[in-house]
Structure formats: C-alpha cells, structure tokens
Image (cartoon, coloured by chain):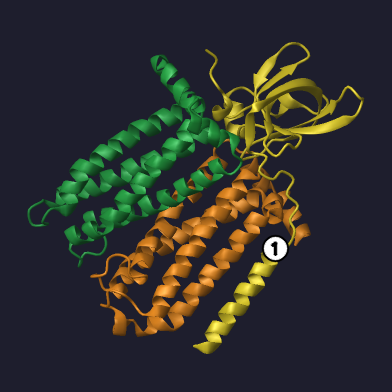
Amino acid sequence: MSRLLPLFEWCDNTRVSVAIRDSRVLFPVIETVHLFALTILLGTTIVVSLRLMGVTLRRQPLAELAAELAPWMDGSIVVMLASGALLFLSEALKCYGSSAFRVKMLLLLGALVFHVTVFRRVSRADESKVGPAWRKAAGALGLALWFGVGLAGRGIAFLE
Amino acid sequence: MLPLVEWLYHTSISVAIRESSWVFPIIETTHVLGLSLSVGVLFVSDLRLVGLALRRRPASELWGQLKPWMVAGFIVMFSSGALLFWSQPIKAYQSVFFRAKLAMLLLAALNAAVYHTTIFRRINEWDDAPVPPTQARLTGWISLALWAGVIAAGRTMAYTL
Amino acid sequence: MKTFGLVRAACIVGLLAATTLPALAHHSFAAEFDRAKPVKLKGVITRLEWQNPHIWLFVDVTGDDGKVTNWGFSGGPPGLLTRRGVNKETLKVGTVVIVSGFRAKDGSNNASGGSVTFEDGRNVFTGSAEDAVPNR
C-alpha cells in the first residue's frame, strides 16, 4: 500500500484539490450532491433488487422495469463517481490513512463489475430464460455490494 | 421549549448515546442509509408521478407495491432521527438548519396529505396515463424538491455540530 | 380544491417564517478547516465536550499582550479516541497543553484538533482518522 503513497500525494496536490480545499462551499455542496445520488442509487437498487428477488411488483415485467429505471441507476452511479472523485481529490492523503476507505474502494470495484455484468444480464433477460435462483442471488448480491459501499463510506468517519 | 430540551439533554439516555463509542455511529449510519429505503423508494414513486419514468406501469400499482417498504423506511428514519435528536437536543434545537429540516418535513407531509385526499382519490381516471394530471405532477415535483431540501438541511446541520 | 390550495399556501408561509427564527449557532461551519492555516497554541483546558459526532476541546490561550482567548478544537468521535487510548481523563480541565491543528475557514477561534502535548512531554492525537495526514 505504501507504494501507492506517491499517487495519493499527487492526487492531493492537483489544482482541483487545492480549489476545493480553498473554497468554503465547494466541499459541502459536492458532498450533498454525493448524498442525493446515493439516495437515488440505493433507492432504485432496492426496487429492482426486490423485484429480482420476487418480493414486490411481481405483475410488472422485470426486464421492462429494469430498463425503465436503468437511466436513473446508471446516472446516479455516474454522479456518485464524479462527486466521489472530487471529494477524494480534495483529501486524498486523508483517504490514504483510512482503512475504511480502502474497503470502500474494493467493494465499489466489486459493485461496478457486478453492475455491468451479472446485474445487466440477469435483469434484462427474459424471465423464462433465467432461473429464479439466479435472479434472487443477483438481487441479494446487488443489495449487499452497494450497501456495503455505503457502510464502508460511513466507516471513514468513525474508524481508524 | 428550551427548558424541555435542556431536560432531555440531561437524561441518562441522552448522555449514554452522546458519549457512546458504538451506539451513536450505528444510529447515525442507520439514519443515513435508511434514506434509501424511505426517500429513495419514494423517489421511484415520484418519478412516475411527474411522468419522467415508469410511464407504462399503473401509478396505483407502483404506489401500492412500494408503500409498505416506504413506510418501513420512514419508521426507521423517524426512530433513528428521534434518537439522534435525543442525544444532542440543545444543539439541534438551536440549529437553524434543523428547524428548516423540520419545516420541510412538515411541508412534505402536508403535500402528501393534500394529494391523498384529492387527486389520488381519482387515480382510476389517470392510472394508465403516461403523463399524470397537473396536480399529481405538481405533487411529485414538490415532493422531490422538499426531500432534497430535507437531505441538504440535515447534511449542513452536521457540519455545525 | 381552492380551500386546500389556500390552506397549503398559508402553512408554507407560516412555516417558512418560523424557520427564520434566529438560532444560536456556536460554531457555524467551523467543521471547515484550512490546511493552509496551521495553528499551535499553548493554554489551559477549560472544557471538554466528550460527545458524538465529534469531541470539542476548549483551551484558554494567553496572547503576548496578556489577553486570554478561548479556542475550540474539534476532534474525532469518542469511540475512535477511546480505541486509541484517549479518554475523558486524558483531557482534564485545568491541564496545560500545547495543541496543534488547522484553523477554521471562517477565521473564528476554532481549529481542527490534532496533536495535544502535555507538560510532561506525553503526546496524544485527538483528530479523526481523516485528520491524520501521513508524514513522508
């Protein structure tokens, strides 16, 4: 991990980093946007995951529901990544020192890979072609990964 | 109000949560992540109300199916919120951001009440309309704006503690 | 329908008016600290708020002109500090300390907590994990 220190130091000193640190409003505004997008991402994830697990909206075709919510899920992921990157740049060295941050990044990587592979395939496929066990697993895994990212993020403030 | 708030501050539960190692972080984390089950799921319902998404789903079905989850979510939010308030009642009471948050929560409830006693009662008339009637859309937009305000006020309040 | 609209409007106006009541905010945005404004001050602890979401340490600092100013230093949450070996007893009222941190962006006499050194040379770190910038 200490081999990444130069990278974190570089991130800590970009013009964007300095600009956010110098401003009194930028960090709070960016963090609030991060919170908005988090609410939308986790909210849409809950709805689609519950449908995947066959718990709610069972009369609505899964593929259509997932497709209609996709712009909002994908859009909120983009906003999370963008706002998250800005927050990170403004305090890269502080993040370096946080074990919760590292766990968050690992889970985020997992969630993103899951999102563009398993999730996309299972949620958009014809329901008759995919066994319910796969759907339930996909629903559960999505919830676990994304809420895991959220939990780890909260851990940054409370853990060493 | 202030004497009541000061009394709350000195109760043993208030002290216990305020000085805790794990309890406060767990309650606060529940409150932040609980936003997804409450406001996040409501967001999906509001998207239908304003006609921006899920236009082919009957509005009443979306509401009916998601309502129990939202209710659970809001129970979590009000419980965790009450405990957070109990732990720092004086600072919360004196915070203009907290007062703004409460005001917007009340307005959101009012918005929902007006909707449910009027246009919602005629939902059969517009259930399948991809773009709901003006009053329904207005309700949706007001809801989105107020909840964004609640989140922003809550986050800003935390900066002042 | 019209009555509902009026009731709604009246409530909105009323509640907005209520929220503009002046509030006593001890620290407004003091959680925003400036890395370009490091401070290192010596003084006597006057108060410790051992509270979530983060502690506040208050220190009476005597300037060169003899004037005493009370500074507030914010720190990490109680749980984090306890696990690090710092507790209420470590920061007793009346103790002489040298505290280092970064000054609040609003220029107030508040700073983010960091290093606290006692007269016997002992040193503890009272900042949150995010306040720990690694030394090369």
Image quadrant containing the N terminus of chain A = top left
Q: Nearer the viewer, residue C134 or C88?
A: C134
- Give the color of chain A as drawn: green
User: Which residue is painted at 55% across and 44% down in the image?
Assistant: A28
Q: Is residue B57 left or right of residue C5?
A: left
Amino acid identity at mark 1: Thr
Chain the render paints yellow: C
Q: Give the x, y percent position of residue B145.
A: 49, 63
Chain under numbered label 1: C
Whether residue B78 appears in this view of the structure is: no
Q: Position of residue A94 (x, y in %)?
A: 51, 27
Outermost residue to the left: A129
What colour has chain B? Answer: orange
Can you say whether C108 is above or below A38 in the image? Answer: above
- Badge 1, how many Cα within 10 Å: few under 14, some, many 20+? few
Q: Outermost residue toward the bottom?
A: C2
